[in-house]
């Protein structure tokens, strides 16, 4: 398993462990692509607010998150808020604003201070 | 998002009601075609900037825009030092915009100017707080109608001056001093301020569409402001700008189209201000939220409402700041100061963007020395224009300097607090989550 896929699994487990947060996202459907600048990719499918599939490969995505491997690893392992690398251009997101805002909300809720 | 919507958003952001006031004062300072020439020169500068922003947005497609570009090129402190003053002075401009809306409303209703301004601020804030964003289509419709309506009305005074045989005298007054003209070009940059913010839309649009829209919107803005400037030079009645309640766009509408045009332009002006402020409030509140999450602003601002996904605490603070700016503009006669300070910050921010474009990761490996030198020269010229605006501010120079010291002081503080990477220990899966949200 790649480092990116392992980090993504960590994030998904943390998210699913937070029942109230998952419940808040009821009805949300989205395919999220994670890409590192060194070429690794993970695709995550969200259905009704829950992650229902994850594949360690690039695929069509509604929301594409790109960063260098260390930054994405830190964010997915909840060591770092996504806001900081986003603000300074080290992490970029492309896709519908509603999906972006929701993902940002989830990541920020899960990330400790 | 399509190119047409992007162009409308870009023009809608740049064309605020307060811009027409700035343009009118530029016309009174330089006179006739000289003001239009200053607009065209500023437009040419912005056309080069549009290409640079297109490149920046392609390499770093980030909604954080300028902060992200300069941070990637020069580091976080430089990013904050140039982006935060621009955003703060944009907020100060909201105060000026609210006052102009108040003046427009006061022209049509018995509502006093402060009440109209406050109603505008609170109404737009309430819409944002409910999580409602004006659709891009509605924003585009309001923008196109205003541009086409005012553009068509502008032809009236020009044709009238030609009919009276005054066109040459109106358009070719004695040349202004060189320093006044340079300051005028710097002030004209203010008119375009915000056109580049569509580079932040690269998250929901293709980089190609963004690049195309940047260039097209600069061309449209140059033509629109140039035409309007000539129309102001040709107004027959010679309106008194010092008269209470004077609003240039209403004077133009009244002379060219009578009472019906006056009402139409007033409504469009308020609508354009509303759509512009709605977008600005939502963007600025998310920026404040992100800075708060990073620790640069109080943590309580980093709370997002779970239902609307809007950072309401940040919105509340922004309303307070906008209301404060409005009071300063009304009580402290700060209309000119807020416009000129924003022009200086825009010039410096644009200079930083030009320099960033010539650095990694934005500069192409094969980029020639002539292009790099040209970029650096334009950056230097932009910084010079900013200084020219400050020096040419006349009686408002002290207020402009005070606003700039406040904005750059706050930026230095934010840079000090936020420039360190925040990294925390990984939580256990069952650990309590952070205090964000509901």
Image (cartoon, grey):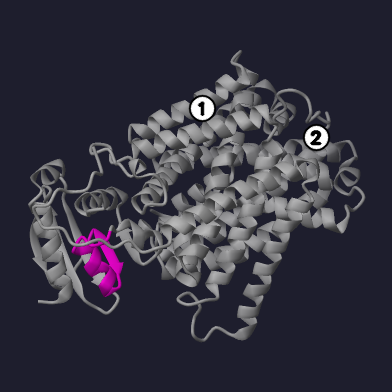
The residue labelled by disc 1 is B120
* Placement of B349 over or under B239, stated as above or below: below
Q: Please provide the residue range marked out in magenta.
A: A61-80
Question: Where is residue B198 shown, x and y percent of the image?
Answer: 47, 54
Q: Residues within 10 Å of mark 1 (few under 14, many from 20)?
A: many
Q: Quadrant of residue B256?
A: top right
Q: Quadrant of residue B268?
A: top right
The one of B413 and A84 positioned closer to us in this rendering:
B413
* Chain label for disc 1: B
- Distance, label 2 to label 1, CA atoms, is 30 Å
Residue in the picture at 59% in, 85% down: B368
The number of numbered badges drawn on the structure is: 2
* Placement of B425 over or under B407, stated as above or below: below
Residue B347 visible in this rendered orientation of the protein? yes
The one of B262 and B176 positioned closer to us in this rendering:
B176
The residue labelled by disc 2 is B235
């Amino acid at each position: 398993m790649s480092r990116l896929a392992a980090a993504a699994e960590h994030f998904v487990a943390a998210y699913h462990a937070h029942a109230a947060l998952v419940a808040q996202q009821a009805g949300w459907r989205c395919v999220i692509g994670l890409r590192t600048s060194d070429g690794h990719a993970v695709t995550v499918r969200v259905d009704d607010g829950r992650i229902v599939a994850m594949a360690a490969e690039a695929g069509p995505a509604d929301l594409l998150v790109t960063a260098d491997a260390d930054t994405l690893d830190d964010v997915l392992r909840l060591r770092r808020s996504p806001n900081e690398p986003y603000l300074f251009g080290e992490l970029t997101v492309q896709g519908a604003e509603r999906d972006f805002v929701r993902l940002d909300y989830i990541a920020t809720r899960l990330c400790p201070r | 998002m399509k190119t047409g919507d992007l162009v409308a958003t870009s023009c809608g952001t740049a064309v605020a009601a307060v811009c027409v006031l700035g343009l009118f004062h530029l016309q009174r300072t330089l006179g006739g075609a000289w003001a239009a020439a200053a607009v065209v020169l500023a437009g040419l500068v912005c056309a080069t900037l549009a290409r640079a922003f297109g490149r920046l947005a392609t390499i770093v497609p980030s909604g954080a825009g300028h902060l992200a570009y300069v941070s990637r090129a020069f580091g976080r402190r430089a990013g904050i030092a140039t982006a935060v003053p621009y955003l703060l002075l944009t907020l100060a401009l909201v105060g000026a915009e609210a006052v102009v809306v108040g003046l427009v409303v006061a022209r049509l209703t018995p509502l006093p100017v402060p009440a109209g301004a406050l109603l505008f601020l609170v109404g737009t804030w309430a819409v944002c707080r409910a999580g409602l964003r004006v659709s891009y289509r509605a924003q585009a419709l309001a923008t196109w109608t205003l541009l086409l309506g005012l553009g068509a009305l502008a032809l009236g005074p020009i044709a009238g001056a030609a009919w009276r045989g005054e066109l040459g005298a109106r358009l070719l007054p004695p040349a202004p001093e060189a320093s006044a003209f340079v300051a005028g070009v710097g002030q004209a940059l203010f008119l375009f301020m915000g056109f580049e913010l569509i580079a932040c839309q690269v998250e929901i649009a293709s980089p190609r569409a963004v690049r195309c829209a940047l260039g097209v919107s600069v061309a449209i803005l140059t033509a629109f402001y140039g035409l309007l400037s000539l129309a102001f030079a040709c107004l027959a009645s010679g309106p008194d700008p010092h008269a209470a309640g004077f609003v240039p766009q209403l004077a133009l509408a009244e002379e060219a189209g009578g009472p019906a045009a006056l009402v139409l332009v007033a409504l469009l002006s308020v609508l354009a201000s509303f759509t512009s402020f709605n977008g600005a409030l939502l963007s600025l509140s998310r920026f404040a939220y992100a800075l708060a999450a990073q620790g640069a602003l109080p943590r309580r601002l980093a709370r997002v409402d779970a239902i609307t996904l809007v950072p309401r605490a940040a919105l509340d603070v922004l309303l307070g700041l906008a209301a404060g700016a409005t009071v300063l503009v009304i009580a402290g006669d700060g209309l000119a100061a807020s416009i000129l300070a924003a022009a200086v910050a825009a010039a410096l921010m644009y200079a930083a963007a030009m320099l960033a474009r010539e650095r990694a990761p934005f500069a192409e490996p094969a980029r020639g020395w002539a292009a790099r030198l040209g970029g650096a020269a334009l950056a230097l010229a932009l910084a010079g224009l900013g200084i020219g605006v400050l020096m040419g501010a006349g009686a408002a120079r002290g207020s402009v300097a005070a606003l700039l010291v406040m904005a750059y002081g706050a930026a230095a503080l934010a840079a000090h607090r936020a420039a360190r990477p925040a990294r925390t220990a990984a939580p256990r899966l069952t650990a309590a989550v952070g205090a964000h949200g509901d």
